[in-house]
Amino acid sequence: MTTIYFIRHAESDFNVLDDRTRPLTIKGTADSVLVTDFLHDKKIDIIFSSPYRRAIDTISGFADSIRLPIHLIEDFRECQRALLDDWRPYAEMQWTDFSYKRSDDECLATVQERNIAALKDVLSEHENKNIVIGTHGIALSTIINYFDNNFGFNDFLDMVFLNPWVVKMCFDEHGIIEIEKIDLIY
């Protein structure tokens, strides 16, 4: 069995507009210790992450504690889209139609396709391992939706402010056998 712990990053600083370099807030940095505490007894074999700073910083304390490197995978990055003050109507349209997007944004179908392709590569190369993947809210939501098409907009809304958040997925040779959502904050 292969077990993957998807770690949705801790609270990030939206004063920094650049998506790739946006750091964690002071609270996010403090909360990342919860990730280290949660993962300490999971016998992790390998660690991957989105290349975005907030995802890396959320799991770096854990990686340092067990002396494993973080392998960056570009396709685990977050959805490309401009920051919106009123993001909810746009998100709802995207969850209604996975191909919906504004001109320079990515649609959820594209985000899902590249994240699932990256996940399949990880699964094929690291069978029967315990794996950590640092990720993001939209990216992780589309991964969950791929395996559980009942996961939709309202589920996405429920997790929007859960930072950090863990989703454990277990796979065998036939595919996914378990999805467990783990809230570290409450």
Image (cartoon, rainbow, N blue to C red):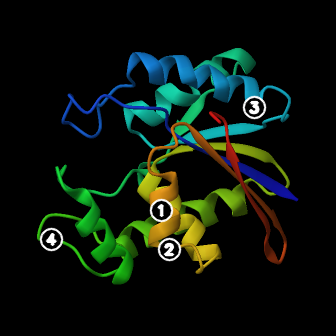
Within-10-Å neighbours for mark 2: few <14, some 14–19, many 20+: some
Q: Are marks 4 and 2 in contact (CB under 8 Å)?
A: no
Disc number at residue 39? Answer: 3
The relative height of residue 4 versus residue 103 in the rendered view (above or below) is above
Q: Nearer the viewer, mark 1 or mark 4?
A: 1
Q: Secondary structure at mark 1?
A: helix
Q: Are marks 2 and 1 in contact (CB under 8 Å)?
A: yes
The Cα atoms of the two marked residues, 4 and 2, are separated by: 20 Å
Residue 163 location in percent, x, y? 51, 38
Q: Nearer the viewer, mark 4 or mark 2?
A: 2
Q: Secondary structure at mark 3?
A: helix
Nearer the observer, 39 or 13: 13
Residue depicted at x 41% and y 49%: 74
The relative height of residue 2 versus residue 91 in the rendered view (above or below) is above
Q: Quadrant of residue 185?
A: top right
Lower sequence index among marks 4 and 2: 4
Q: Nearer the viewer, mark 3 or mark 2?
A: 2
The Cα atoms of the two marked residues, 3 and 4, are separated by: 38 Å
Amino acid under disc 2: Gly
The Cα atoms of the two marked residues, 1 and 4, are separated by: 20 Å
Name the residue that disc number 1 marks: 156
Q: Are marks 3 and 2 in contact (CB under 8 Å)?
A: no
Within-10-Å neighbours for mark 1: few <14, some 14–19, many 20+: many
Lower sequence index among marks 1 and 3: 3
Q: Secondary structure at mark 2?
A: loop
Name the residue that disc number 2 marks: 152
Q: Are marks 3 and 4 in contact (CB under 8 Å)?
A: no
The relative height of residue 11 versus residue 95 in the rendered view (above or below) is above
Name the residue that disc number 4 marks: 102
> Which part of the image, by quadrant, shows the N terminus?
bottom right
Amino acid under disc 4: Arg
Lower sequence index among marks 3 and 4: 3
